[in-house]
Image (cartoon, helix red, strand yellow):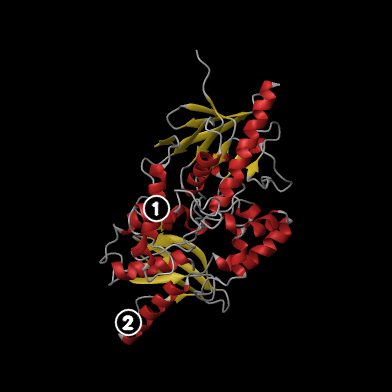
Amino acid sequence: MTNPKIYDLIGIGFGPANIALAIALEEDADPELRAVFLEKSPAPQWQENMLLGGSDIQHHPVRDLVSLRNPRSRYSFINYLHENRRLIEHLNLPTPFPLRTEYADYVSWVRNTLTTEVRYGTAVLDIAFDPVADLYTITTTSGEELLAQQISLGPGRSPLIPDQFAELLDTRRRVVHLTDYLPAVRSFDPLADGRIGIVGGSQSAVELALDLRHRLPSVRVDILTRSWSLRAKDHSPFSEEVYTPGFTDYYHGSSKAARRRLDRFTRPTNYSAADLDVLERLYVDLYEDKLSNRIRTRIYGDTEIIAARRANDTVALAIRNTTTGHHEELVFDRIILATGFRDMGGTADNEHHHPLLDGVHRQLRADTDGDLIVDRDYGVRPITGTAPIYLNGLCESTHGIGDSGSFSLLSLRAEVIARSIIDCRDRTRITVTA
């Protein structure tokens, strides 16, 4: 029996995070590097269930998969436009940011252009670590076992489902997370689903409200948010400096307590807020409703959801105004959770580690709180051994808001991880040779 092939790197997930890493490895690494990426979807598409008509991205287009690391790369967004003969027309668009559908096509174009080995339709069931061999074993749902000296974990963050709704998610889709929006909304019946509730005050919440109002004009769409009302993101230039590698260094070098304090400053740049253009569109829509003596949307601000329960074919929410203390019950035909995603860490709404690390996390370095110790290169090392797992896009709690789902520092993070992968491989070669 022949020995199984040992990969220098196995990437789990082939979304933007690991695509950016694959580009960095293709452009800068040793061509003999043995790497493979595993993607559970047979034909993945970036944010496929949130590609709403007219929606745009929330970052500068040059903060793409590669340009901050290598502005001469053929995989840049600008070159994508050039090769698809849309550069001039794109420059004439009266929008500050590219359309989300076009950026999704850009991601797919890069994915299809890369020469990297990718196995689509391959889901990971388990990750195990052998400290003696200093190797990881990755088991797929087909039963295949792959060996790796290093792993780049980039499956995206886990959806945040508030506890009140955890038991209400089922195939009937009375309650859905935003990541399931487009498949779900196609089954909505404007006659039977007369009232829809959106939970959250984010960019996604406002975009969903606008889409539903346009898609189902006879339906009432309400928004429930913990903030007093909807608010604009802080895109002022000094605040936007949190999306720089200098801030990442500053944040990573800080204590846990300092990081949580910094979070309070950085959150309005990306969370529980929306871009001004969509807020203005919704405000105008609501004003037109008043002119027509209609109430198609109400914003329930300062609202805490105490409980949620099924009520025949509806969902009843017990809510409380956190300022006045007033309680009431609202009944919806459908609920959409624009509640975002879980970060890594032990605080509320987070998780100590991504579920794919369930079988190995106890063998990885952690602090006294049980939180994984993540080095500046995004690597988590085993307690015994040296083989790292790079958390590619899962380190906001240790590296700051630039490591969120945003593209802002994607290519620079890929550069850091790629250099560490090459250094680790070189050290392994020296050890084996010696």
> Badge 2 is on which residue?
294
Q: Is residue 244 above or below residue 375?
A: below
- Residue located 50% across and 45% down the image: 155
Q: Earlier in the sequence, mark 2 or mark 1?
A: 1
Are circles 2 and 1 on residues that touch, CB within 8 Å? no
Residue nearer the viewer, 117 or 169: 117
| Mark drawn on residue 80 | 1
Q: Residue at x 60, y 37 (%)?
A: 421
Q: Amino acid at mark 2?
A: Arg
Identify whether 173 is placed above or below 364.
below
Quadrant housing residue 277: bottom left
Q: Which residue sits furthest left?
A: 191
Query: Residue 290, position in %: x, y?
Result: 35, 85
Q: Residues within 10 Å of mark 1 (few under 14, many from 20)?
A: some
* Horizontal side of residue 197 vs 250, given as left or right: left
On the question of residue 174 being in view, the answer is no
